[in-house]
Image (cartoon, helix red, strand yellow):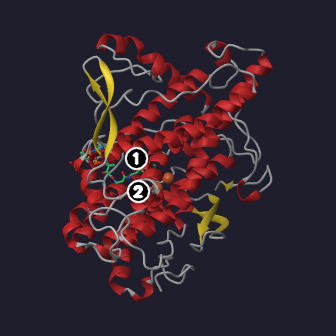
Amino acid sequence: MTDAMNVDYDGLIPNNVGLSTDERVKKALEKWHPGYIDWWMDMGPEGFQEALVYLRTAVGVGSNGWARFDYVRMPEYKWGILLAPAVTDRRIPFGANKGEPVWQEVPGEHRAMLRRLIVIQGDTEPASVEQQRHLGKTAPSLYDMRNLFQVNVEEGRHLWAMVYLLQKYFGNDGREEAEELLRRRSGDQDSPRMLGAFNESTPDWLSFFMFTFFTDRDGKMQLEALAQSGFDPLSRTCRFMLTEEAHHMFVGETGVGRIVQRTCQAMNQAGITDPFEIECVRALDVIDLPTIQKKANLHFSLTLDLFGSEVSTNAANAFHAGLKGRYREDKLDDDHRLETATYPVLRPTDGVIQSMDVPALSALNMRLRDDYVKDCQKGIDRWNRVIANAGITFEIRLPHVGFNRKIGEFKSVLTDLEGNYLTQEEWAAQRDRMLPNAEDQTFIESLMQTSVGVPGEYAGWIAPPRVGIDNKPGDFEYVRIA
Ligand code: BYC
Ligand code: FE
Ligand code: FE
């Protein structure tokens, strides 16, 4: 039953977890459902709840053919509970209990730690929907609008995924946490979302694409680490979520890539060779490359904070307990216990930033962050190829990991993009060349005043995609606006 490949669509909640025979959890979820819909109507995409959107819905969990595309009103989207198929005889892959059979129930001694991880993961999902709720009104095309809404409904489903775990495995306090997930609000003074970056605003489409490139990629890394978990229901949930996450990063990478492409094209047509002639480039109604770089600096640094402190006992405990592993733990070749290993951590010391070996167990956040930075760089390389192919001399670069940090080793130092220390005064003088300022923001928003609602048309600051969603032709009507 639990490793069914097909989804049961009979009840209110599509699922492959045998909900129809689990009265207790079914009732709990059905009770939670109206509150979720209220939240979606209040905090979901503003102005488009009636629109018919060409969305994909999961109808199976197999590695191919799991999606069906159709026009759906978002509030009627089938938010289901979908677990990747169980792996026969799966063993805890790391930590003190390595090699023992995975847990199908919550191990009592790790209950609080596990609940905290699930709640934090769950909290980010609705937060991102809240952050993105105004963007429909300024979408550069129906294609992009549809992708935004696809990401939004899937983040909603990710909330369901975590709420299912809370309702099924954590009894009363799980139910309370599930309610709290609907109560907190991104950016709210009194009851904010749990992690820093999820309380920032996503004011424009360049930010949206940067967010899905950088911040959804933190989602990918954290889900990869949780997919290794010895708590098997969490592992299976995360494994299925990762298949959806790939599309979110596609949206971010190609979104920024298409903006870069359009800027380079406009520069070439106008005969501008110097990317730093900002006023001339902006006069073409495209976003200059240095401003794109500044947005990348902002979203990269905000996202690095999501990895927590480089040296962390929480991370050590979660690994030791077998709850949260490393990126591709099952592909790594070591003892998977890390009781004697070390790992290099970058630390600011007087005058210099130094690499220091610390116990590997305590450096797991640093390690996941290192894997994340490598993953980001691959996408950046692809953006840079677009610029190089256009014959323009400019390279988008990831800033130093110490730049603009609020969490961890670097939170009490100021650095420039290369990691050189700055005094308060130097920071104040240089900030506007490193991060978007009010003027940059005003310019970006001046380009994004309305949405483009004609099928096949695109705003002038972004290139059309190379292929459509679900192989649809260029003039396909991805959203039928009510
Ligand atoms: N903001 O030992 P520390 C996604 C707190 S994104 C505020 O340094 P730890 C998505 C921390 O909670 C992926 N507080 O770090 C993307 C702790 O507080 P308590 C989300 C922070 O615990 C886009 C204290 O500082 N999933 O899915 O090892 C769209 C000391 O903690 C922050 C996860 O994060 C911060 N940035 O690691 C939609 C996975 N950082 O408990 C969705 C689950 C740290 O002492 N979470 N703190 O009061 C975790 O694995 C860990 O909680 C963290 C932090 C990696 C977040
Ligand atoms: Fe998500
Ligand atoms: Fe995502």
Image height of 30 relative to 124, above or below: below
Q: Is residue 270 visible?
A: yes
Q: Is residue 461 visible?
A: no
Q: Amino acid at mark 2?
A: Ala
Rendered view: 5 above or below 204: below
Callout 1 amino acid? Leu
- Image spot of residue 10 (x, y percent): 53, 84
Question: Assess mark 1: CB under 8 A from ligand 1?
Answer: yes
Residue beneath the point at 46% across and 35% down = 299
Which secondary structure lies at badge 1? helix
Q: CA distance from mark 1 to mark 2?
A: 8 Å
- The residue sitting at the left extreme is 109
| The disc label shown at residue 225, or none | 2
Identify the residue at image location x=35%, y=14%. Answer: 428
* Residue 41 falls in image quadrant: bottom left
The C terminus sits in image quarter: bottom right
Above or below: residue 162 compared with residue 366: below
Q: Which mark is residue 368?
A: 1
Q: Position of residue 195 (x, y in %)?
A: 33, 45
Which residue is painted at 77% across and 57% down in the image?
A: 472
Q: Are marks 1 and 2 in contact (CB under 8 Å)?
A: yes
Q: Where is residue 268 shown, x and y percent of the image?
A: 77, 20
| Badge 1 density bin: few <14, some 14–19, many ≥20, Cα 10 Å | many
